[in-house]
Amino acid sequence: MKKLLFVMLLGAFAMNMNAQEVKLGLKTGLNIANIRVNSLDADSRTGFHFGAIAELQLTDRFSIQPEVLYSQFGAEEESESLRINYISIPIMAKYYIVDGFSFEAGPQFSFLANDELEVFSPIGSGVFNPEVNSFDLALNLGMGYQFNGGIFFQARYNLGLTNVQSNPDVKNGALQLSLGYRF
């Protein structure tokens, strides 16, 4: 099912690529992730993301940028570390305010790659399966700057909309800082 959705999304973008300018690229960056839940005061987990982008220029000021990323989320506290890694597909609408500088917003569809809960205890430590949901939907909001030579910077906040687990009500959140290159 996941592969079918991915192929359908790529096919839809490929059909639209004929009439517009398309620029491909790569990006990588830092995730400062946390989970949002009322009863937990966890510290953020620092991770990374990397992947490919395709920017479809629709007008001089507006473009659509689908991405495929490997991205690390989760949280940490003194006695445990929750690591959640996804294959994420953000689809960002970008509006260029002035040459190079853009605001961006769009949904992100994430599919679980792996998850683990590591517990540290004086009586024994271990790694457990936290039973994270296999799909996560988020809203991304951010801004970016594109240099003439192809290098770009982005800052984005990822606001999780769906529950990471069914009990308790836990949602992802992450600040993403990216550096990339468009060909």
Image: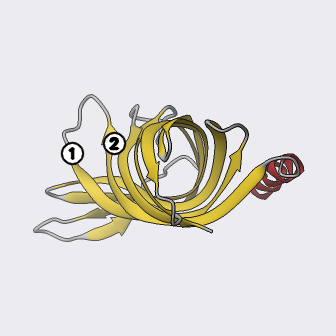
Point 83% across, 51% down: residue: 17
Q: Looking at the image, which residue sits at the far top?
A: 38
Q: Which secondary structure lies at badge 2? A: strand
Q: Which secondary structure lies at badge 1? A: loop
Percent position (x, y) of residue 26? 56, 67
Percent position (x, y) of residue 4? 82, 54
Mark 1 residue crowding within 10 angstroms, few (<14) / some (14–19) / many (20+)? some
Would you name the residue on which mark 1 appears?
42
Q: Tell me whether circle 2 and circle 1 mark residues in contact (CB < 8 Å).
A: yes
Quarter of the rendering containing residue 157: top left
How far is the residue under mark 2 from the one under mark 1? 8 Å
Point 36% across, 46% down: residue: 174
Front position in the image: 119 or 70: 70
Mark 2 residue crowding within 10 angstroms, few (<14) / some (14–19) / many (20+)? many
Q: Can you say whether 59 is above or below 82 in the image?
A: above
Counting residues from the N terminus, which is met first, the one under dot 2 or under dot 1? 2
Name the kind of residue labelled 2 in the image: Ile
Would you name the residue on which mark 2 appears?
35
In the rendered image, is residue 129 in sight?
A: no
Q: Can you say whether 148 is above or below 12 in the image?
A: below
